[in-house]
Every structure is written in C-alpha cells, then in structure tokens.
C-alpha cells in the first residue's frame, strides 16, 4: 500500500499549536511511520471502507505527546481539513486500485 501511504503522508498532518507535523514524519515504532501504519490498516478494506470507518480507525490510534506525559487519539490532533484529505486519498486509491 505504498502509494496510499505516500498520498497520506504528503497531505495529512497533525496540528500542535499551529505546527503542522505530516504523518510521513511521525514514527510510531522503529521503521514504521504513521502514514504507513494507517495505509496498511486501510489497505485490505480499501474498496469497501467508509469515511466513518476511517474516522473510527484514527480515533483508535494513540499519539504520544510530551514523551508519554499525554496520550491523545490521532483524530483529536488531526484538523478537519486534513481528515478530509485523508478521506480523499482513500477514495482516490480505491478508484485507482493501488
């Protein structure tokens, strides 16, 4: 799901006090970027996943802030416009059969 991860990574970000951190730059584990994690989670359901299911997925992904002092759902720190770009990337990928 490399193409989906690339599309997500270049267009979708979290916002921390006005700072935009793109999902491609967020490490969830060694050698695992957030955009890759989301793309591989969505990929198997690409043709049938709804926007609501995508939102539920990102609500379940915890984002560690302050070296573990605070954990927040990914959806809580992703602005609405960026979530819409995520939906658009998933829709485009489903049409293109990546």
Image (spheres, rainbow, N blue to C red):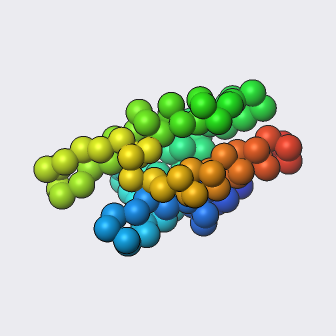
Q: Nearer the viewer, residue 1 or 85?
A: 85
> Is residue 42 among the parts visible in the rendering?
yes
Residue shown at 53%/53% (left/top)? 80
Residue found at x 54% / y 44%: 38
Closer-to-camera residue (19/40): 19
From the viewer's perspective, tell me whether residue 84 is left or right of residue 62.
right
Going by the picture, which residue comes out furthest to the front?
80
Counting from the top left corner in percent of width and height, residue 86 is at: 62, 50
Q: Is residue 52 above or below residue 96?
A: above
Q: How many labels sit on residues?
A: 0
Horizontal and vertical percent position of residue 64: 26, 50
**Left or right, residue 53 beside residue 75:** right
- Image coordinates of residue 91 in percent, x first then y, are 76, 44
- Residue drawn where x is 59% and y is 29% of the image: 53
| Residue 85, position as x, y percentages in the image | 64, 55
> In the picture, residue 12 is in which quadrant?
bottom right
Question: Relative to the observer, which residue lies in front, 23 or 18?
Answer: 18
Q: With respect to residue 51, does 19 lie above or below?
A: below
> Is 49 located above or below residue 20 in the figure?
above
Measuring 70% from the left and 45% from the top, which residue is drawn there? 90
Quarter location, residue 51: top right
């Amino acid at each position: 799901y490399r193409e989906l991860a690339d599309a997500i990574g270049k267009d979708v970000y979290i916002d921390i006090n006005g700072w935009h951190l793109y999902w491609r730059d967020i490490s969830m584990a060694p050698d695992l970027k957030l955009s890759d994690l989301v793309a591989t989670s969505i990929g198997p359901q690409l043709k049938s996943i709804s926007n609501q299911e995508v939102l539920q997925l990102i609500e379940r992904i915890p984002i560690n802030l302050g070296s573990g002092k605070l954990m927040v759902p990914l959806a809580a720190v992703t602005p609405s416009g960026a979530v819409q770009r995520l939906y658009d990337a998933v829709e485009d990928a489903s049409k293109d059969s990546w």
